Amino acid sequence: MCRRIWILTEILEYSRIRSALYRKAVVSLALRKIVLRSDDVLRKKCKNVEIFDEKLGILLDDMAETMYKANGVGLAAPQVGILRRAVVVDPGDGLLELVNPEIIKSKGSQRDVEGCLSCPDEWGYVVRPMEIIVKAQDRNGGHIQLKLKEFSARAVCHELDHLEGKLFTDIADEMVDPEEVEKERNGNGKRKKGRKK
Ligand SMILES: [Zn+2]
């Protein structure tokens, strides 16, 4: 019994230290300022990432932190003023970091409402592929290939457009009233469909 209590105490102590370390790590991340659509940086084509160093890791960490803090599902480097081909996306099932991403195959189509962290209060219907295969590099330069469908495919397509200097408002076939989107989000529970990228 005593030993069990001792072990429990040790576990609690261990998790306390771990969470303190985690907090310290989180605090060291930095939020970046998200640039708005009036900024020319969003209209420029991004260059490939060629150096996979600590600076890239910090950029990706900061981008993820900034995206989560803004309650977004994706963020591209130009949205924080960096003209490099790097994006972070979390469509709801985990964080994806894509460096030098490229869509190598796409099929089908889907039409749904999109928003963008750089275009507050603007929402519109955009047609995107239903399924895509993306090749990219990770933060260490390793090569990855992913098959993404539905909302994940939409989110990645939106972010990759940012790397070309394109915004969803360029290709939206119908802009919609933000209040209507909000009502729909609250009404039918499809929250993630209306979240910004
Ligand atoms: Zn966007």
Image (tube, rainbow, N blue to C red):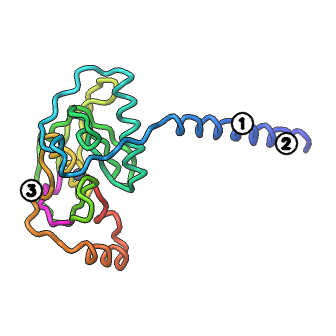
19 or 92, which lies in front?
19
The CA distance from mark 3 to mark 2 is 63 Å
Residue under label 1? 14
Q: Is residue 188 above or below residue 55?
A: below
Query: Where's residue 108, x and y in %?
Result: 10, 57
The CA distance from mark 1 to mark 3 is 52 Å
Query: Mark 2: which secondary structure?
Result: helix
Residue under label 3? 170
Mark earlier in primary sequence (3, 2): 2
Q: Is residue 13 left or right of residue 90?
A: right
Picture quarter containing residue 27? Answer: top right
Query: Where's residue 8, x and y in %?
Result: 80, 43
Q: Is mark 3 within 8 Å of ligand 1?
A: no
Q: Is residue 2 left or right of residue 69?
A: right
The CA distance from mark 2 to mark 1 is 15 Å
Is residue 138 magenta-colored? Answer: no
Picture quarter containing residue 100? Answer: top left
Neighbour tally class for label 2: few under 14, some 14-19, many 20 plus, Cα within 10 Å: few
Residue under label 2? 4
Q: Amino acid at mark 3?
A: Asp
Query: Mark 3: which secondary structure?
Result: helix
Mark earlier in primary sequence (1, 3): 1
Q: Residue at x 36, y 40 (%)?
A: 63
The magenta segment is 123-131
Mark earlier in primary sequence (2, 1): 2
Mark 1 vs 3: CB contact within 8 A = no
Mark 3 vs 2: CB contact within 8 A = no
User: Which corner quadrant holds the N terminus?
Assistant: top right
